[in-house]
Image (cartoon, rainbow, N blue to C red):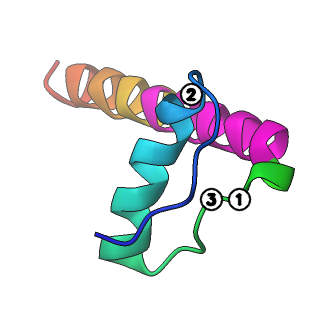
Amino acid sequence: MVHGIQNDWFSYGVVLPNTIAHDVFGDGLWILRRAISDRVDWFLTFVNNMKEQKLQTNLEKVSSC
């Protein structure tokens, strides 16, 4: 798989999901100069997905009453 070039020991947490997103969805490859903003973007993506999942679960609970 094509992937961004990581030259440190701590960016794998961003580079790995970016590699998958690049292969599956055509996202741009991770580059070092966007390391901080990409880390924040991925964090917000996960948080928003968790919030949406929790909201969906709560809606299912309410509709089953």
Residue drawn at x 22%, y 30% as measured from the top left: 60
> Mark 1 and mark 3 in contact (Cβ < 8 Å)?
yes
Residue drawn at x 56%, y 23% as measured from the top left: 9
Give the mark, 2 or 3, whose residue is nearer the N terminus. 3
Q: Measured from the top left, where is residue 40 in percent x and y?
A: 75, 35
Q: In this view, does 13 lie above or below 16?
A: above
Measured Cα–Cα span from mark 1 to mark 2:
23 Å
Measured Cα–Cα span from mark 2 to mark 3:
20 Å
Amino acid type at image mark 2: Val
Residue 16: which quarter of the image? Answer: top left
Horizontally, residue 10 falls left or right of residue 24, namely: right
Q: Name the residue under label 2.
A: 47
The rendered magenta stretch, by its main secondary structure, is classed as: helix
* Residue 47 lies within the magenta run: yes
Residue 24: which quarter of the image? Answer: bottom left
Q: Residue 3: which disc?
A: none
> Mark 2 and mark 1 in contact (Cβ < 8 Å)?
no
Considering the numbered disc 3 on the image, is that residue within a helix, a strand or a loop?
loop
Q: Mark 3 points at which residue?
A: 30
Q: Which of marks 1 and 2 is in front?
A: 1
Residue drawn at x 82%, y 44% as measured from the top left: 37
Horizontally, residue 44 falls left or right of residue 12, namely: right
Residue at the limit of the structure toward the front, as seen here: 7
Q: Nearer the viewer, mark 2 or mark 3?
A: 3
Residue drawn at x 59%, y 32% as measured from the top left: 11
Quadrant showing the N terminus: bottom left
Measured Cα–Cα span from mark 3 to mark 1:
4 Å
Considering the numbered disc 1 on the image, is that residue within a helix, a strand or a loop?
loop
Give the magenta range.
Answer: 35-50
